Amino acid sequence: MNAIEIVKLTKYYGKICALNKMSLDVPEGTIYGLVGPNGAGKTTLIKALVGSLQPDSGYAKVLDLDPLKDKWKLRQQIGYMPQSPALYDDLSARNNILFFGKGQHVPDLQKKVDEILSFAELTKRANDAVRTFSGGMKKRVSLCCALIHNPKIIFLDEPTAAVDPHLKMQSWILFRKLAQKGVTIFVSTHQMDEAMLCDQVTILRNGEILAVDTPQNILKLGKTNVKIITNNEEKVSVIDSTPQSLADELKKYGLEKNISSVELHSDTIEDIILSIVQEKEKGNKS
């Protein structure tokens, strides 16, 4: 079953094409990563999926609902954390979360607010006005608001930008637990370490999909530099980043005893995504 189905979704801002006939399926219960630089179309796509933006053509289904025609029914089943926290600065963290929880008619709300404040390590600041919070702390409150009603899908737009490493790690532990319970996590990010934590990744550039695959398979698109030192003589070769390619390369040397060092320097996912983008741009120019 797919939690999200997108068919030829297109959106223009004037002459700028933000989404170019985009088609995509997102399976239920997965952590799905949308990766790309600023201006790639990540936020536009999320806004179209939560019903806050009308595409020019194509369509999307979220939980088999139309994000525009079934907007109010859909919003009861999804959580959305925008890139810039949408909070009431004059209210406390607790009252912000209570406000969103009451809007969703969450049962046993006070208890759930206490639990989620504890998770986000905001208990000590729960009654302080949000305007006194740092950007990272506001992100925590915004995440709590998105999760308070136990949604089936959570849309997260750059959820851990400006968040300290500890909370970032805690957030991804929670995301994985939610996915194991069948919740779909749809997350946009430009942080490559987060892309590696997703089950599947779509790479976007200028509103177009460049690649859709698991992070592990995307890594295999890169190259590995193999440096072998034999009797103080250094030999360097470039191979595909697969176990089979490494085995084939080492067979050339028969794994001799006088091989004193073998070093592997593989392309990072950042290198590979940059290479994919550059190849696409070369193709557009030709």
Image (cartoon, rainbow, N blue to C red):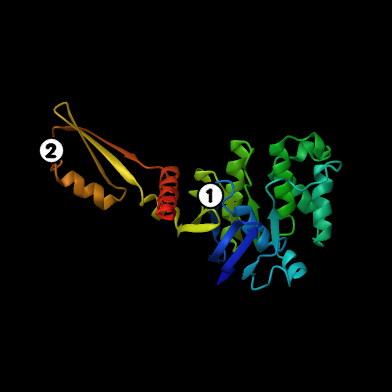
Which of the image's four quarters has the C terminus? bottom left
Measure how far apart labels 2 and 1 are at the Cα level: 44 Å
Where in the figure is residue 45, as x and y percent of width and height?
Answer: 62, 59
From the image, tell me which residue sits under label 1.
Answer: 36
From the image, tell me which residue sits under label 2.
Answer: 256
Residue 150 against residue 69 in the figure, above or below:
above
Left-right relation of 211 to 159? left
Quarter of the image for residue 136 reads top right
Pick whichever, 124 or 135, lies toward us: 135
Residue type beneath disc 2: Glu
Which residue is located at x 74 percent, y 64 percent? 75
Quarter of the image for residue 269 reads top left
Looking at the image, is mark 2 or mark 1 earlier in the sequence? 1
Quarter of the image for residue 250 reads top left
Pick whichever, 18 or 237, lies toward us: 18
Residue 199 visible from this viewpoint: no
Between tags 2 and 1, which lies in front?
1
Dot 2 lies on which element? Answer: loop
Which of the image's four quarters has the N terminus? bottom right
Left-right relation of 254 to 89? left
Dot 1 lies on which element? Answer: loop
Q: Residue furthest right?
A: 90
Which residue is located at x 59 percent, y 37 percent? 165
Residue 94 against residue 41 in the figure, above or below:
above
Residue type beneath disc 1: Gly
Residue 139 against residue 207 in the figure, above or below:
above
Q: Are marks 2 and 1 in contact (CB under 8 Å)?
A: no
Residue 3 circle label? none
Left-right relation of 68 to 110? left
Where in the figure is residue 187, as x and y percent of width and height?
Answer: 59, 53
Which residue is located at x 64 percent, y 38 percent? 162
Pick whichever, 187 or 262, lies toward us: 187
